[in-house]
Image (cartoon, rainbow, N blue to C red):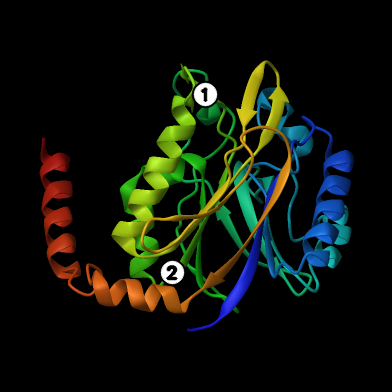
Amino acid sequence: MTGKFTVALAQVSPKLGLLKENLQLHLDTIRRAKSEGADLVVFPELSLTGYILQDLVPDVAIDPLNSPSLRQLLQGCRDIACVFGFVEISDRYNYYNAAAYVAEARIQHVHRKLYLPTYGMFDEMRFFAMGEKLRTVRTPFGPLGMLICEDLWHPSTLYLHVQDGARVVVTLSSSPGRGVRTHEGFQTSQGWETLLKALSQFYTVYNLYANRAGIEDGAYFPGGSMVVGPVGEVIARSQTSGEDLVLAELDLDEIRRARLFTPVLRDERLDLTLRELTRIVRQRSQS
């Protein structure tokens, strides 16, 4: 697919556990993104609920297909595509850290976070179930991959998305700032930028990274949202603290040019990868 479209990264600061207030924040931000010409607006991880939920998880969980509280938000996404984060409750009463892609006032796809950090300050596996599927969704902007924060730090996720046709990968994040370096910002922020640049260049895709802002339960979220192009260059970035709305025009024809110059995906040997992974899994099961 060729063509251009405009994306808006909504670096917002949601209020912990307050669905009504956060819903209004989304509606206001969507209206602003539409007024500035965006075709797609991307919110951070758990943007409807806040991040450090812990025992609040059951109280803010919703069934996205049968939620009265979401109807107004879906209507707001009638003339613009939206990606936002929320807590999903399944019919088996499992809770998921999830993200929805909405277009034409309808949920088109839901991604459940695959990798739940449970180390250091993170305790997600105590409160959430792990997602079990990774699918690339077909959109007017071409095949779109969706990931949530820790997912991107596992190389297999982006690999699978690009093999499934993704041209653009969206990562929703609530990554607190950690590891202060003099005059250089947070070590974690630098790590995200290095990762996004390397993956974009290696896989020749656009990476859209939306990280939240604000302070929550003693944790500081520095933002640092950015759009990285298919040769690894930062096309647009947010301010390093506070709420922001970052707009960038994406030209999908740049992916074609990048892949002519660096045909890594063309030469990828899926049969070899599958064969060796099967061998490794078999060996591990026998050990």
Q: Amino acid at mark 2?
A: Ala
Left or right of 2 in this view: 221: right
Other residues around mark 2 within 10 Å, as few (<14) / some (14–19) / many (≥20): many
Residue where numbered disc 2 is placed: 166
Label for residue 151? none
| Image coords of residue 120 (percent x, y) | 46, 18
Residue 59 vertical placement versus 67 (above, below): above
Is residue 2 depicted above or below 262 in this figure?
below
The residue positioned 74% from the left and 28% from the top of the image is 56
Assign the C terminus to one quadrant of the image.
Answer: top left
Q: Position of residue 237 (x, y in %)?
A: 57, 48
Q: Which residue is mark 1?
A: 122
Residue 158 is drawn in which quadrant? bottom left
Vertically, is 129 above or below 9?
above
Task: Provide the secondary structure element on which disc 2 rests.
Answer: loop
Q: Are marks 1 and 2 in contact (CB under 8 Å)?
A: no
Tell me which amino acid carries mark 1.
Answer: Phe
For residue 244, side relative to residue 211 (left or right): right
Q: Secondary structure beneath disc 1?
A: loop
- Residue 81 in percent (x, y) is at 70, 68
Residue located 35% across and 44% down the image: 154
Counting residues from the start of the chain, the first of labels 1 and 2 encountered is 1
Viewer-nearest of discs 1 and 2 = 2
Q: Is residue 117 visible?
A: no
Q: Nearer the viewer, residue 141 or 254?
A: 254
At which x and y percent is residue 46? 67, 41
Residue at image position (13%, 48%) is 280
Q: Which residue is at 24% across, 69% downward? A: 262
Q: Residue furthest front?
A: 183
Badge 1: how crowded within 10 Å, few (<14), some, or many (20+)? few
Measure the C-alpha gap from mark 1 to mark 2: 29 Å
Does residue 172 appear in this view? Answer: yes
